[in-house]
Image (tube, coloured by chain):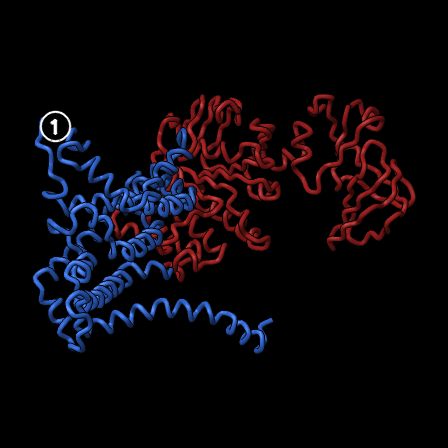
Chain colours: A red, B blue
Amino acid sequence: MGRIQLNQVQKKFGDVEVIPPLDLEINDGEFVVFVGPSGCGKSTLLRLIAGLEDTTAGHIEIDGDDATMLPPAKRGLAMVFQSYALYPHMSVRKNIAFPMRMAKIPQDEQDRRISSAAKALNLTDYLDRRPGQLSGGQRQRVAIGRAIVREPAAFLFDEPLSNLDAALRVGMRMEISELHKKLATTMVYVTHDQVEAMTMADKIVVLHAGVIEQVGSPLELYRNPRNLFVAGFIGSPKMNFVEGSEAAKHNAQTIGIRPEHIDVSTTEGAWQGTVGVAEHLGSDTFIHIHGIPGCDPMTVRASGDVMVNHGDTVYLTPHEEHIHKFDAQGLRIG
Amino acid sequence: MATQHSRSAARLMMAPAVILLLGWMLVPLIMTLWFSFRKYLPLRGGDQGWVGLENYARFISSSSFWPAVQTTLIIVGGVLIITVAFGIVLALLLDQPMWGQGVVRILVIAPFFVMPTVSALVWKNMFMDPVNGILAHLWKFFGAEPVQWLSQESLQSIVMIVSWQWLPFATLILLTAVQSLDSEQLEAAEMDGAPFLKRFWFIILPHLSRAITIVILIQTIFLLSIFAEIFVTTGGAFGTRTLTYLIFQRVLESQNVGLGSAGGVYAIILANIVALFLMRIVGKNLDT
C-alpha cells in the first residue's frame, strides 16, 4: 500500500514561500515523476513527503493516516538520494542491512532479504566491498537495494541518475522502470530531465515556481499541454511558439507547433525562411530556420536524408491538426 | 624540467636546509647520549669522566622513576580522554546554526592562545586558590569545605588545567571534520530509522575517526613533555612529578647532568613505545 495525499501543503523558508498551498494525490502503485526546471521546488516537495522538511501548513496523508507530524522513519517510505548517501565505512552488505538493523529484524530474515535484493540488482559479487570501491552505477544500485529491503510503502527518488554518465543513465532508467513493474510499489521520482519523466512516468507532475502547472500521463501532457510553460517544457526539441499575425489568423495570442509536426519543402509551403544551423543526428535532422515572422529561429525535425545547406531557402507547412493555441494569459484555447 | 642536471642542482640547493635541520636534531641528541655515559656534576667538580651505564642504572632504580612514568601516562591519558570526549560534544554543538556563531567559535578557541605558564597561574590563583579562588567561593556558597585543589587533588587539577588548554585544539579539528560530513548521509540514516544516538554511533563517529586519530597523535607528542603547568603550580610535589619534570630536577636541582641525560634517553624510549602503541591502535585509521 502506498497512497499519498497532499492537502493544501505549503512550505516557507523564512518569508520566502517556496511552495504555495497545493493539493496532489498519488495512487497506490503509481510511478509519479515531479519534473520542472531547477529551483522549482520539486526536491522540497519530495522532502516534505519524506518528512525531512516540516510543512508550514497543510496535511500529508499516507494510506489515509495523517503523517504530517510523523518523523521520517515512521512514515514507511524509503528514499534514494542524489549523492546515493551510502555509508562509506560499511561494506555493501552492511549498508543494505542498516535499515533492517535499526528496525531490529531477525538476522536470518535480514540475510534472506539481502540476498534477494543483491540478486535482483546484480550486487551478489560486491557485497563485501566498500562503496568507495564501486562504480557510480553500482553505488546507485546499492542505494536502491538499501531502499528495497525495507519493503516500504513508497520509494522516493531525488534525481538519482544525475551523477551518472549518459549511457549508464539510459540503462538505469530501464532498470528502475523494470523494478517498478516487478514490485508494483508506489514510486515518486524527482528529475529536471523531461526525457526521464516522459520515459518512466505513469503520471507526470510539472512544477514551476512551486506551483503545479499540470498533472497527467506523458502523452496527455505532450498532446494537450494546459499552458505555454508545459508546452515548452515537455518535448524535445522544444515546441516552436509563433506570435503576431500568424497567431491572429488562428484567433490566438500565441500558437505552438512542435518541430516534428512541420513539413519541409524546397519548392512550396506556407512559410518561407532560410536555413541556419542543421543538427544531423543520423536518423533525424533538426534544422533551425530563420526569417519566419513571429518565431526566430524555428526548429524543424526532418528525416535524416533531407539535404539542405546553410543559407538555402526552404518552405514550411505546419500540420493544422497539431497546432496548439494559447490566449494572452498563456492558457490553452480549445 | 626534471632532468638529471636539474635534480642534482635541486639537491644541492636543498642541502643547507637539510643539513641545518639534521644538525639541530643530531647535536642535542648526541650530546645527551654522550653526557649520559659520564659523571658530570657542574658545581661539584665538573666532568669527571666515563662511568658506563651507572647513570642509567641509578635513574631507573631511583624510587621516583616508576611513579614519574605512571604520572606521565595518567596525565597524557586523562587529558586525551577529556579533550576528545568534550571536543566531540563541543564540535557537534558548534556545528548547529545559532545566533552569534562567529563570536562563540572565537571564544571557544581562545584558551589555545593563552601561554601555558599564564593559564596555569590563572587557574592556580583565581580558580583553585583554597581561600580566594572562585571554586572555593562556590564550595562555600553551597556550605561545603573548599577543596585544596593543588595539594589534595593535585593530579586531577593538572589534568583539568591541561585539558582546558588543549580542548580548543581538539574542538577545532573535530569541528572541521563534523562540517565535512555529507548531510545526505545523516538524512539517509534518519530515513533508515536511526535515532540520534545511533546516527552518532554508526555514522558520525566513524566519520570522525580519522580526525580523532590526528588529535590523539598530535596531542600525545605535546603532552608527553608538558612542564610549565607543573612548574608554576605544584612544582612537582604531591605526586605530580612527570618524567620530564624528574629530568629537570635531576639536571638543575641536583646539578647532575649525567643522570638527567640518562633520564632523557629513557624519555625518548618511553615516547617511542607510546608512539608505537598509538600507531598500532589508531594508525590504521589513517590508511583508508
Query: Which structural element holds mark 1?
Result: helix
Residue that numbered label 1 is attached to: B140
**Horizontal placement of A186 versus A272: left or right?**
left
Expressed as whole percent of the image width and height from the top left, the position of residue B17 reads 45, 67
Decide if residue A11 is in sight here: no
Q: In this rendered view, identify the residue nearer to me: B135 or A222.
A: B135
Expressed as whole percent of the image width and height from the top left, the position of residue A130 reads 39, 58
Amino acid type for the residue under numbered disc 1: Lys
Expressed as whole percent of the image width and height from the top left, the position of residue A144 reads 43, 48
Q: In this rendered view, identify the residue nearer to me: A180 or A74.
A: A74
Quadrant placement of the N terminus of chain B: bottom right
Relative vertical location of residue A15 with respect to residue B156 in this rendering, above or below: above
Q: Residue at x 85, y 36 (%)?
A: A292
Q: Residue at x 27, y 46 (%)?
A: B117
Callout 1 environment at 10 Å: few (<14), some (14 to 19), or many (20+)? Answer: some
**How many numbered marks appear?**
1
In the rendered structure, the residue with mark 1 lies on which chain?
B
Q: Residue at x 25, y 48 (%)?
A: A106
Quadrant placement of the C terminus of chain B: bottom left
Q: In this rendered view, identify the residue nearer to me: B150 or A53.
A: B150
Decide if residue A191 is in sight here: yes
Q: Residue at x 34, y 34 (%)?
A: A74
Expressed as whole percent of the image width and height from the top left, the position of residue A137 reads 50, 54
Splitting the image into 4 quarters, where does residue A318 fall?
top right
